């Protein structure tokens, strides 16, 4: 019987390259995805040092930026664009809150993995092509699906916790 | 995008503890958005029923009460338990969803599950009317199969909504459906670079398991979320196992058989028309 198991040895490579990136939604599309047909009014907000401290205390999550990208939904509710940074990933996502502050929906808008410093795409490709001679693999045009790396969404969970505390302490009336 | 019929929609949400990406084509934009929303909702439904981390989930109720009296569960949970027991039986326990107390003792699952270390999969009875009963104190963790099942549920929803092709990828556990061949790149968790040769996939699923993702030191020992039921020790070698199968729950469960009982795995892969790829760093 021919074995149905294939062994592959992964070459130990200097993992300094961006591995995967995907853009799903821009701000307008994310608004439509979470609040279809709704009217939203932009109402950016800057947290005071006291508010920042209170949010950090309540949520147990560090507030990286005091500028809130915030929209108010005309029929009630909020739309917030936020960013979280993990060890290797950089994620922009949108959180929709109902009028009572409960989570309506979370949509990832932009997802980027980065291993190592910022590398310009052209440089990246040149380096990559040299290493993988003959292969057609290219960054983000060709690689649509990856299996074998389950990335945790813990940072988004923390981000949402921080935003829910922001709602409780700052937005709720 | 490269679709030939209608527009393509790709969405990503944080679910099942990871990122779930759904891509679908073959309907007008509004119908496609509804179909993808419904598919995410079916994943959320599986998550709400079967999360071991959520004390209010149906699974947590089973873990708390099924030793005392039979607990009635949903069609979905019953289906996952049935399939899990089938693979446990076929693999002589190399796949076993009752290792939750071991994981809890390593700080990888809620601490209260530690005490229910009384038995194994053979102590799980599935009774008429979708009732579950434990003959010993047990705790079930469906982490090794429910993610794949959730991917299957999303694909079922997308088919019902009449999309012509779709991909559902839950952090590496994925399934594609439709007439086209999809190419999926494998990646070892310790290496950022995907392999250059993709795997072809058509109306099939892939799932991957690797101890590298959760491997940590715990009281002087190396532990991970993958446990070999035979000796209740952690799988700690630096490999990643990917299985291609018809359905994602099956691929998901078979990765554990390949990890824990490689000698048995070939026969089981053959039986289920599946294949395995082992990536070694």
Image (cartoon, coloured by chain):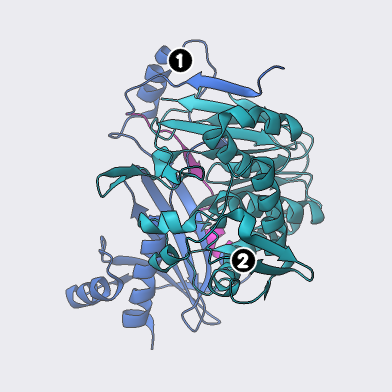
Which colour is chain A painted?
A: blue
B228 relative to B177 in the view: left or right: left
Residue at x 27% of width, y 74% of height? A55
Numbered tag placed on residue B135 in the rendering: 2
Up the image or down, B99 lies above or below B213; here it is below
Quick one: which residue is furthest to the left in this view?
A49
Residue at x 47% of width, y 10% of height? A133
Residue at x 18% of width, y 77% of height? A50
B4 relative to A59 in the view: left or right: right
Badge 2 crowding class, 10 Å Cα cut-off, few under 14, some 14 to 19, many 20 or more, is some
Report the front residue among A79 and A54. A54
Q: Can residue A93 be seen in this view?
A: yes
Quarter that holds the N terminus of chain A: top right
Per the rendered image, the range of residues in magenta is A16-33
Chain that is coloured cyan in the picture: B
A87 relative to A99 in the view: left or right: left
Up the image or down, B121 lies above or below A113; here it is below
């Amino acid at each position: 019987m021919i074995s149905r198991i294939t062994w592959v040895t992964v070459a130990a490579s200097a993992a300094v390259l961006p591995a995967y990136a995907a853009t799903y939604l821009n701000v307008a599309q994310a608004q439509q995805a979470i609040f279809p047909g709704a009217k939203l009014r932009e109402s950016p907000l800057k947290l005071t040092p006291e508010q920042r401290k209170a949010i950090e205390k309540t949520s147990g999550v560090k507030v990286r930026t005091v500028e809130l990208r915030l929209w108010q939904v005309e029929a009630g509710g909020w739309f917030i664009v936020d960013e979280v940074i993990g060890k290797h990933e950089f994620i922009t996502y949108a959180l929709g809150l109902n009028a009572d502050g409960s989570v309506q929906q979370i949509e990832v808008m932009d997802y980027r993995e980065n291993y190592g410093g910022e590398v310009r795409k052209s440089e990246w490709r040149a380096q990559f092509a040299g290493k993988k001679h003959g292969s057609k693999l290219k960054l983000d045009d060709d690689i649509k699906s990856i299996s074998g790396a389950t990335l945790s969404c813990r940072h988004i969970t923390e981000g949402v916790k921080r935003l829910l505390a922001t709602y409780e302490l700052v937005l709720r009336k | 995008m490269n679709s030939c019929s209608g527009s393509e929609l790709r969405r990503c949400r944080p679910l099942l503890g990871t990122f779930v990406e759904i891509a679908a084509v073959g309907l007008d934009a509004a119908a496609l958005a509804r179909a993808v929303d419904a598919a995410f909702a079916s994943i959320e439904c599986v998550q709400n029923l079967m999360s071991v981390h959520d004390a209010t989930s149906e699974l947590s109720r089973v873990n708390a009460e099924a030793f005392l009296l039979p607990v009635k569960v949903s069609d979905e949970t019953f289906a996952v338990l049935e399939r899990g027991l089938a693979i446990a039986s076929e693999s002589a326990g190399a796949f076993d969803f009752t290792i939750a107390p071991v994981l809890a003792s390593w700080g990888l699952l809620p601490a209260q599950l530690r005490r229910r270390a009384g038995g194994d999969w053979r102590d799980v009875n599935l009774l008429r009317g979708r009732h579950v009963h434990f003959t010993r104190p047990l705790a079930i963790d469906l982490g090794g199969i429910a993610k794949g099942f959730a991917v299957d549920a999303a694909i079922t929803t997308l088919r019902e909504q009449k999309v012509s092709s779709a991909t559902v990828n839950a952090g590496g556990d994925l399934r594609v459906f439709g007439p086209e061949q999809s190419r999926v790149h494998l990646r070892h968790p310790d290496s950022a670079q995907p392999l250059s040769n993709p795997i072809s996939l058509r109306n099939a699923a892939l799932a991957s398991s690797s101890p590298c993702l959760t491997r940590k030191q715990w009281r002087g020992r190396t532990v991970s979320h993958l446990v070999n039921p035979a000796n209740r020790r952690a799988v700690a070698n630096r490999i990643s196992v990917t299985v291609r199968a018809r359905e994602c729950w099956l691929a998901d469960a078979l990765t554990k058989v390949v990890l824990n009982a490689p000698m048995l795995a070939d026969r089981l892969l053959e039986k289920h028309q599946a294949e395995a790829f082992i990536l070694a760093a």
